Image (cartoon, helix red, strand yellow):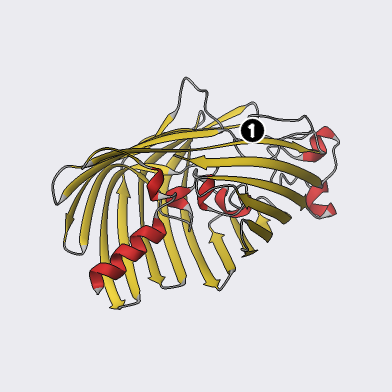
Amino acid sequence: MKKSFSLLLFIASIPFDSHAAIKITDNFSISGFGSASITQSDNKTPLFVHREVSDEVCYDCDTILGLQADLVITDVFNTSVQVVKRPQDDWSDPEVEWAYLAYNYNDWSFKGGRLRLPLFLASEYYYVGQAYNWARPPQEVYDSILGFTFYDGLAIQWDYYLSDEAIVTISPYYGFSKKYKTELGDDELVFDAERITGVSLEVNGFNYRVHAGYMYADFDMLPEPTYDRLSMYTLGAEYSFKQWLFMSELETDNLQTSWYLSSAYHFDQFTPYLVYGESHHRRKSNNITAGLRLDLTNSISINAEWQNIFMGQEDYNNGSMGQFIAPPILNNESKDVQLYTLMLNFVF
């Protein structure tokens, strides 16, 4: 029973339709995913880290294309490589999002290489738009670490069966020294991380999932070395009931606290959804999202989405960025923004 339940959990966690994978041999397969959008806001101040949507119609702000290769070497060894052209990347310079070797023994798994930071519910499939209902994961939480998604290091995973219908997964990890770069408008920020340590804990049941994470990092911000430490805590849960799916996540660290609530109702090929989110302290803002997803096939979907992002007048006057790349008051622009998105997602 444990093996069959474990298989069900594995299938449920796959970020896209497993039938879309191209099987090259019995132990080697290739799969892929992508997203493209037409999007525009009513504010000329760029919106969202790495996407920078403004009041000009944008056809490539959300463009993503990823390829993944999986190889089962032996009964206990396997390896996986994922290369992604992310929204911030040029086509000629995609990013290796993960590349690791794994050793599996009973309920234990040991991984080494480039691994995904296990901070959020959608971390493992963050760039696979076909895997979630929204056009984009809620920015309040998922942009809280400026778009950083991976680390180079080691991880251990242990699975413990609470019952035939529930399993606990605990995974401590350690990241080696690495420089992370990100762009905010015309500014490039460099974070020279001395080390990253953390742990994730997840409980999977028949119709629910609870995820908790902790990450600690020592780093210098360049070009002028400024030593700092980051302690981040995350907590998320999702629950399905008949055609309903409810999700919520909370992120808090030294500089900010952010959270969101999401509900979606699935009928036939359609999934309407609503999201409410808030960011406090560093990036103060509120966000209301309404959208409709249409599943054309198991591998292709379309999202039509509207977002209203706003902040308080006092925060605006004090130069708060909210979810913008720069404080909108610097451009003499409104503190509020309406965002419209038509998104195509696919897997293969």
The foreground one among 16 and 323 is 16
Residue 100 seen in this snapshot: no
> Where in the figure is residue 125, as x and y percent of width and height?
45, 49
Task: Tell me the residue that label 1 is attached to.
Answer: 61
Question: Which residue sits at x=59%, y=54%?
Answer: 133
Asked which quadrant contains residue 52, the reply is top right
Q: Residue furthest top?
A: 92
Q: Amino acid at mark 1?
A: Cys
Q: Residue furthest bottom?
A: 163
The foreground one among 142 and 146 is 142
Question: Which residue sits at x=28%, y=74%?
Answer: 161
Question: Which residue sits at x=83%, y=47%?
Answer: 317
Which quadrant is the N terminus positioned in?
bottom left
Asked which quadrant contains residue 251, the reply is bottom right
Instruction: Specify whether 64 is left or right of 150.
Output: right
The foreground one among 244 and 85 is 244
Instruction: Specify whether 79 is left or right of 313.
Output: left
Count of numbered circles in the view: 1
Report crowding for label 1: few under 14, some 14 to 19, many 20 or more residues within 10 A (C-alpha): many
Question: Which residue sits at x=41%, y=49%?
Answer: 217
108 over 144 or under it: above or below: below
SS of the residue at dot 1?
loop
> Where in the figure is residue 113, as x and y percent of width and height?
27, 40
> Where in the figure is residue 88, as x and y percent of width and height?
55, 31
